[in-house]
Amino acid sequence: MKTLTVTELTFAIKGILENSFKSLSVKGEISNFKLQTSGHLYFTLKDANSQISAVLFKGSAASLTRLPKEGDQVVALGEISLYAPRGQYQLIVRELQFAGVGELLLKFQQLKEQMHARGWFDPKWKKPLPKLPKKIGVVTSPTGAVIQDIIQVLKRRFSGFHLILAPVKVQGEGAAQEIAQAINDFNAFGGIDVLIVGRGGGSIEDLWAFNEEIVAKAIFESKIPIISAVGHETDFTIADWVADVRAPTPSAAAEIAIAEKANLLKFLYSVREQLLTRVKEKISKEKSKLFAMRRHPLFSTPHALLYQPIQQLDYYRISFERLKPLNQITAWKERLFPYSHRLPLTTRALILQKREKLKRIEEHLTSINPQNLLKKGYSILFVENSPSVILSVKDLQKEQQITALLSDGKVTAKITEIHCNE
């Protein structure tokens, strides 16, 4: 008989074990569970009579929907390995299924196929969400984080919202019936613009109420648009496919419900900022123009604006003065005076004669000037408010108003009697 070393024996056993149990499925209860900082999971699988060490490495553990805990019944898929330094065999787990999950997944797939065959997933049945919902209904647990998350989002983004909560169980016995009844009640009473139906994340068992046919039927038959918000982004339920819109999380469902108002507010804020910017630019531009105008010489002093018209007025005044006959005569006198001494005696005599004649004409005109006559006690009568001179009593009538022009003013009189010399 050959004598083996411990190492030779260990590796011989290792080869036999690992080659014989390359792929196996073991059912048992989780015990001594430990999560290492490396991300690897170490635990023991046991039943009533035996136990075996097991390890689920970090790469394989990433596919778990949740971490196992003490007492969980699981099915471990993997292979046997022998750890030589300790001479200990263990189960290397590649996949871990919680007991009952396989049956639920099979049932889930069957329900999904049934609903799809009925057309409940067809996009043509999807109702559009209201643009500006006034009342938002929520079907969820009153004590979970979901309702608080929804309220916080609405408070932050949708001031003045009106929310109505239908408190229901979201897992366990009777949960599906309560969820379906709440959806039906909202439709029966009316007044709700959009419904959010959901709960937080969990295992497939935790979310199973939202896979029940009674819930899917209530969602499909709802006249109110429904947003499904069940679990986390990676969780899918039958309710998600039947609902009008699927939200990855309850918070996202609240965002989706008020998205249109948020977009409108964002647009209005943007427009307001643009208007303010343009008004400021316009004011600044007009201020610059105003300052430039104020600095212009025309507006620096009134004389700069008026000097040209004033000069033109002075020019016209001087021109007018020059055109007066007396001024023209004076001007001609001044121009002719230097030549008067050079004129012949006969011409000078003729000028003196003409001057005397002009003087007599001037005296005559002065004597017949109406103003001079008025100074002697005469007056001139006019029809009131008219330049027409009254020449005869025949032109007058009783009670007629007349104006009398005197040397130092006017008087108004009324005709009371008329006497004709004829």
Image (spheres, rainbow, N blue to C red):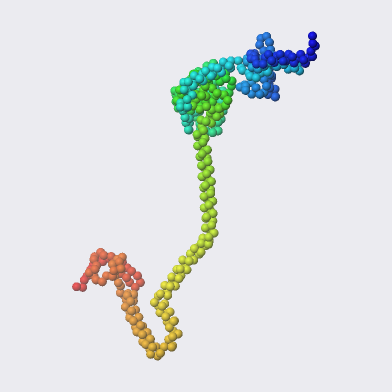
Q: Report the residue at 53% width, 41% height from top.
A: 270
Q: Position of residue 123 (x, y in %)?
A: 47, 27
Tell which of 351 and 296 is nearer to you.
Answer: 296
**Picture quadrant where residue 46 is located:** top right
Q: Name the residue rendered at 38%, 86% in the picture.
A: 351
* Left or right: where 189 falls relative to 67: left
Vertical placement of 250 versus 265: above or below?
A: above
Which of the two residues, 275 or 218, is positioned nearer the viewer here? 218
Where, quadrant-wise, is the N terminus in this rendering? top right
Counting every numbered tag in the picture gives 0
Quadrant where the C terminus is found in the figure? bottom left
Q: Which of the 4 quarters of the picture holds residue 345? A: bottom left
Location of residue 311 in the rendering, given as x and y in whole percent from the top left corner: 47, 68
**Residue at the outermost bottom position:** 345
Tell which of 410 and 312 is nearer to you: 312
381 left or right of 31 in image:
left
Residue 132 pos. (x, y %):
48, 33
Work out whether residue 77 can be spotted.
yes
Horizontal and vertical percent position of residue 372: 34, 76
User: At 34% across and 84% down in the image, what residue appears?
Assistant: 357
Q: 371 or 420, which is in the foreground? A: 371
Residue 62 found in image quarter: top right
Residue situated furthest front in the rendering: 1
Residue at x 71%, y 13% (from the top left corner): 16
Which residue is at the far left?
422
52 sits to left or right of 372: right
Establish if 393 lies above or below 271. below
Instruction: Mark yes or no: residue 178 visible.
Output: no
